[in-house]
Amino acid sequence: MNRARTALFIAFSLAYPLAVYFALGRFEPRWLALLLFVLALLRAVAAREAVWLAAAGGAGLLALTATIFNQALPLKLYPALVNAVMLAVFAISLRFPPTVIERIARLQDPQLPASGVIYTRRVTQVWCGFFIVNGSLALVTALWTSDRVWALYNGLIAYGLMGLLFGGEWLIRQRVKAAQRG
């Protein structure tokens, strides 16, 4: 059941910007806040760590604000909130290892060598930089651009950039591994 909740949360999160964009102008923001509330509820149910409970609370607060004031802005702030939470998770793991990326790497290689720990720390730092830039752009698009630009960035471009980072890191990792073997 936990995997089903996680999959549902991921699907809702990925579709969120486009769903909001297509619903704006057709429904009042207070009704769209239900989607954000569902995301907050799914996150709260699945949460086992304080940071994820805080994220659920933040999403719930945005949904409540959108409902009370019937404004779209709180709904558009959700991607910035997600990036802030991800930044916090990754940055905290830098301060209190193992890093997020090291934990993921150890799923494939429990005996990760010291060079791998150093590499995963560097990758975690890169992701922190990504979350700063992406979160800033999510905030800028929410505050100062049209709904169309906000949806384009947060519902398409941000995912493309994330995919480029995943793919680029995978290519670099293959080179690093080959250099260590050869």
Image (cartoon, helix red, strand yellow):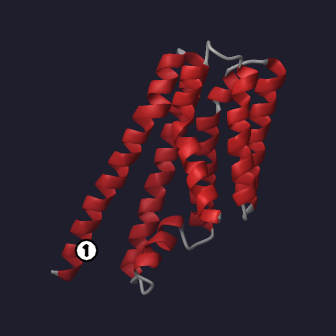
x, y percent for residue 91 = 59, 58
x, y percent for residue 160 = 37, 40
Q: Is residue 51 visible?
A: no
Element at badge 1? helix
Residue situated in front as seen by the camera: 97 or 17: 17
The residue that mark 1 highlights is 177
Judged left or right of residue 115, residue 1 is right
Q: Residue furthest bottom?
A: 111
Circle 1: residue type:
Lys
x, y percent for residue 110 = 45, 84
Q: Residue furthest right?
A: 68
Q: Quadrant of the N terminus?
A: bottom right
Q: Residue furthest left?
A: 182
Q: Residue at x 77, y 40 (%)?
A: 60
Where 110 sits versus 68, above or below? below
Judged left or right of residue 171, residue 139 is right
Q: Which residue is drawn at 80% across and 25% down?
A: 67
Residue situated in front as seen by the camera: 88 or 79: 79
Residue 161 found in image quarter:
top left
Where 181 sits versus 149, above or below? below
Q: Which residue is drawn at 58% across and 29% down?
A: 139
